[in-house]
Amino acid sequence: MHSAQRNGANATTCRFHSYLGDPDHRMCNIGSPSQTADNFDSIRHTDVMDTVRRSGSVIVQRSPESLYDMVADVTRVGEWSPMCTACWWDEGDGPHVGAKFTGRNEGPERTWETRSEVVAAERGRQFAWVVVEPPTAARWGYSFVAKDGGTEVTETWELPPEGSAFFEKMFGDDAGKEIGIRSDWAQSGIGATLARIKDIAEA
């Protein structure tokens, strides 16, 4: 059993505060410490915000079904993600809608965990999950389309208005900057992830 599972609910709460850069538990922060983001000026603090979206695509010389099987096995995510080093399903769960899993992320200054729920699981077509703890509602998804004798794999990250509202609650006027930081992380991570998936799948 994983250490976070052994230690129970209190450990679950603390692991998020560790990730959030809030050792004194003053607030439920949602990421590593504030830093400068190239695009934060384009994302302003507002009462209502649109969905923030980042995506990338790559052609892989494998079938949609085989690539779906790779990606839907979240226990393999550490093989291709530059930040999420490990994932594990809740006991008895697997790649189906409603299934939940925990992911461990490692940054330069800290390690943290998140909880996610699968929201789309159509073999050969799409696989996606939403982050539920912390409650950012960020959606990560993959789609698979047969193309050029292989498959076009598209990875997408979306932060919906309710996720932006959570950032606003936590960061106030700095919410736009913090969203911009995570948007940049998503964009760079998508490129690296897709390149690695292609390398592994075509090896």
Image (cartoon, rainbow, N blue to C red):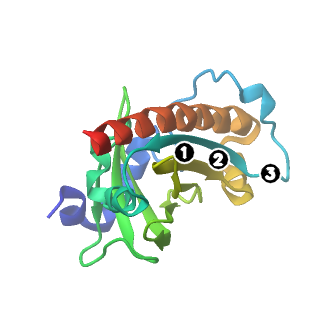
- Disc 1 target residue: 29
Residue flagged by tag 2: what amino acid is it? Met
Q: Nearer the viewer, mark 3 or mark 2?
A: 3
Which residue is found at the position 58% from the left and 48% from the top?
157
**Residue 149 in the image: above or below residue 37:** below
Q: Which of 43 and 64 lies nearest the eye of the viewer?
A: 64
Residue flagged by tag 1: what amino acid is it? Asn
**Residue 173 in the image: above or below residue 5:** above
The label on residue 154 is none
State whether residue 78 appears in this view.
yes
State whether residue 111 appears in this view.
no
Lower position in the chain sequence, tag 1 or tag 2:
1
Left/right placement of residue 53 relative to residue 188 reads right
Which residue is found at the position 64% from the left and 35% from the top?
178
- Residue 77: % across, % down: 32, 49
Farthest residue in the right direction? 47
Lower position in the chain sequence, tag 3 or tag 1:
1
- Disc 3 target residue: 50
Circles 1 and 2, Cβ within 8 Å, touching? The answer is yes
Left/right placement of residue 126 relative to residue 169 reads left
Q: Quadrant of the C terminus?
A: top left
Question: Residue 10 sits in which quadrant?
Answer: bottom left
- Residue 161: % across, % down: 74, 56
Residue flagged by tag 3: what amino acid is it? Asp
Q: Residues within 10 Å of mark 3 (few under 14, many from 20)?
A: few
- Disc 2 target residue: 170
- Residue 183: % across, % down: 62, 37
| Element type where label 3 sits in the image | loop
Lower position in the chain sequence, tag 3 or tag 2:
3
| Cα gap from disc 3 to disc 1, whole angstroms | 21 Å
| Element type where label 1 sits in the image | loop
- Residue 145: % across, % down: 53, 57
